[in-house]
Image (spheres, rainbow, N blue to C red):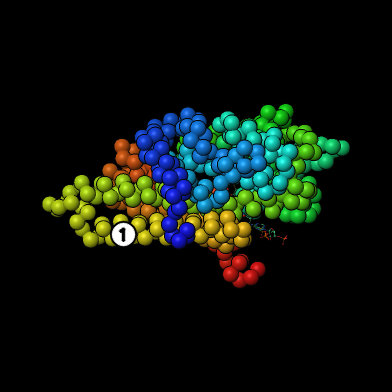
Amino acid sequence: MAMFDLNETQKQLFEMAKDFSNKEVWPKAKELDETAKFPIELLKKTHELGMLNAFVPEEVGGLGLGTFDHCLISEALAMGCAGFCTAALANDLAAVPVILSENKQVWKEFLAPMVDDCLMASYCVTEPGAGSDVAGIKTTAKKVKDKYIINGSKMWITNANYANWFFVLAKTDPAAGHKGMTGFVVPAKTPGVTIGRKEDNMGQRCSDTRGVTFDNVEIPEKYLLGKEGDGFKLAMGAFDRTRPAVAAECVGLSQRAMMCAIDYAKQRSAFGKLISENQGVSFILAEMARDIEASRLLVWKAACEVDEGRKNTYFASLAKMFAADACMRITTDAVQIFGGYGYNKEYPVEMLMRDAKIFQIYEGTSQIQRMIVGRILLGH
Ligand code: CO8
Ligand code: FAD
């Protein structure tokens, strides 16, 4: 059954992605963490393998993959390095509102070139004063004849320094709350766009996070996505597709942490026997496996729902909430199994634990996922 097994094409895709991740990404993860250098060479290879920008519609030359297949790629890439995987996924997060808007002119101008070249993009929604509360953003877009003038500041924007274009959410009617919000594509080189310094983050350090300011940025009307007032729903609609992918990223990172913990438990001795021979240690490993399998099933469910054309907001939030919280527990427990060595940078698990934390924060915090599910359960 499709739900519990992959078809042959999906198996091949997953195996190819895992092979690349194990052989080419994981060996570089420590260096990427230490140098915090943007993994452009790895992204280029990912692009060559057809695994970057995989959402780009067939109509403009892309693979037009569904969310399920996209989640397989995400899980595999995150087994290699979560920061690198986040850089890859941020492109998809930027592309989805453009795809949902059905603005074919913008597809041709901004999505089609991403098929031929390893180009990057960013999703600019969060601001210094508003993250969870998307409707509270302050950036404005004012129509002047056949142009829009954008003013405001965005914060924590992944890929900002490497992006060729940005998806920008702004208020065209500030008095109308979420109904007055509109999405635009803004080419990164437009005068008035300023990229901030690289933020010095706890984990996923090779991923590029920056502020972006828009100072009287003038863009043509044709870069508006959908119509005025559609922006909030385009921004939310993107999460329905990318929260399952972020949850899949959590599964990949968790899997790596469990593999490290198993290897270590099988070679470290205490009290005259291997630590893996203690039931106390094997129970920790068993709980890791339980949470990884359960997370993956929620990812698959959330992805299948949206691929089948059904509203999946509920499952997308369940998957993101469960997999992110599980990933934090699993990576923390991996450090525990390594004992003092786990707390040291010579061993990989402290990096995995730092890399895991952001999953409970970005793409909607773990509290926001609970809020979304709670509201749906209670019919609000
Ligand atoms: N799809 C379509 N429409 C939606 C959706 C959805 N999923 N959710 C809500 N809506 C609609 C509602 O139906 C409602 O419509 P109407 O006006 O017709 O009744 C309207 O939107 C307003 O909905 P709400 O009343 O629920 O709006 P609220 O303002 O109360 O809040 C949320 C909604 C859900 C709390 C929203 O603000 C939210 O999701 N906040 C979290 C923000 C977030 O996730 N930010 C992430 C930023 S991006 C990021 O972190 C990137 C990480 C790096 C890249 C990683 C790789 C991908
Ligand atoms: P706040 O919204 O201020 O929340 C602070 C705390 O209050 C959190 O614990 C939150 O859960 C809690 N809280 C808030 N409201 C409620 C509530 N109603 N009920 C219960 N608890 C609540 N954004 C983008 O637009 N594009 C990106 O590419 C991007 N990449 C990011 C990369 C990194 C490394 C980071 C750190 C952030 C990124 N973000 C991005 C922003 C990210 O999505 C936000 O940081 C996140 O949504 C939380 O917003 P905030 O930081 O403003 O926290």
Above or below — where is 17 with respect to 234? above
- Callout 1: helix, strand or loop? helix
* Residue at 49% from the left image edge and 56% from the top image edge: 299
Q: Position of residue 289 (x, y in %)?
A: 35, 57
Q: Position of residue 78 (x, y in %)?
A: 44, 44
Left-right relation of 34 to 125: left
Q: Is residue 80 visible?
A: no
Local packing at callout 1 (Cα closer than 10 Å; few below 14, some 14-19, many 20+) is few
Q: Position of residue 108 (x, y in %)?
A: 69, 36
Assign the C terminus to one quadrant of the image.
bottom right
Q: Which residue is mark 1?
A: 286
* Residue at 18% from the left image edge and 51% from the top image edge: 274
Q: Position of residue 159 (x, y in %)?
A: 57, 36
Q: Nearer the viewer, residue 112 or 148?
A: 112
Furthest toward the right, the residue is: 145
Left-right relation of 20 to 239: left
